[in-house]
Amino acid sequence: MSRIASLPLFHQIAGKQVLVLGEGPAAEPKRRLVERAGGVIVEDFARAVDEGVRLAFIAFEDAQACEVAAINARCAGMLVNVVDRPELCDFTTPSILDRDPLLVAIGTGGASAGLAKHVRLRLERVLPDTLGALARALEAARPLLRQRYPEGAARRRAVDEALREGGPLDPLDPQSFQRVAAWAESGISTLSAQTELILVTSPDPEDLTLRQARLLGEADVLLVYGDVPPAILARARADAARRVFHVEQGAQAGGKQGSGGGLEGGETGSEPGKAGSGTGLQTGAAEATQTGGTRPGLTVVLHWQPD
């Protein structure tokens, strides 16, 4: 599996205490960030320890003072951020694009705050100001969506269909938020199970077509035939159920049946897949989906077939 340098998380600190140590131009941006997120700033270390504070920003001008404070805060059970010292950090703060309640966080793990900022500035020009209104409209439509689609997979497919490029709720269309209510009332179509085949011929995810990348991002189930490169698998939805089929070399070449591998993603059991031609793979996908009891949604078959 492809690795990422950091685990991105959105930490809710509204009404909670956060330790901020230091003065001057390095500390002030951290104070503003904490206040903007609704946090309560604590500037006394002993008080922070006594009251069980769990997050700390350290911004002393003296490098040694930063190191000592970081060690002490970590020993007290706090997660620590030391300004401009990524090697001392348990977490880093990204450059934030705010379309409340939608947030886009761009980080480099401390490698270059300037790069993260300029990527954000480019995105600012692309993403409409009405994205927040679209998010709130979709939240308001959630009860009706749950009524229409009790199963999560079908509900995700309906929303994916609407939000994709050119769809009725295309996120880059500034007027999309105005159409959510009408779409939820009358524009939701009945969705059935769908199976798509992707022949992977290159280990470079940049060689995927736009359609293939979209299918991977929307898949409810992945059926993986052969040693599909980790960089390709990383483009799929993280919560998609995965069935891995270990296909023998001869099966890939001659269409013989491969041996069934284990299931990932929290499911149990597995069925052998048919390898070889695209038709055989799609048939095997349908059989495996039916056997596994997968609910209506998008199943993507990934077949490793390098050039």
Image (cartoon, rainbow, N blue to C red):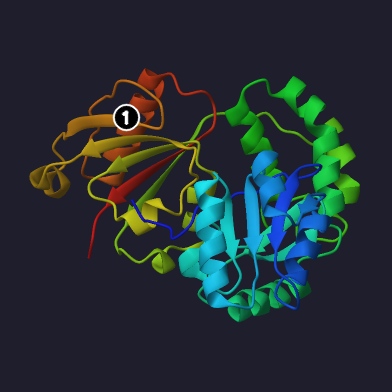
Q: Which residue is mark 1?
A: 263
Between residues 259 and 95, which one lies in front from this camera angle? Answer: 95
Where is 210 relative to 278, above or below? below
Between residues 165 and 151, which one lies in front from this camera angle? Answer: 151
Query: What percent of the width, then of the height, locates residue 269?
Result: 30, 20
Farthest residue, direction front: 46
Residue type marked 1: Leu
Q: Secondary structure at mark 1?
A: strand
Residue at image location 70% in from the left, 77% down from the top: 122
Query: What percent of the width, then of the height, locates residue 237?
Result: 50, 45
Residue at image location 71% in from the left, 59% down from the top: 20
Farthest residue, direction right: 178
Query: What percent of the width, then of the height, locates residue 92?
Result: 58, 62
Residue at image location 51% in from the left, 69% down from the top: 86
Between residues 109 and 174, which one lies in front from this camera angle? Answer: 109
Query: What percent of the width, then of the height, locates residue 54?
Result: 63, 45
- Say whether residue 128 is visible: yes
State which quarter of the image contains the C terminus. bottom left
Q: Residues within 10 Å of mark 1 (few under 14, many from 20)?
A: some
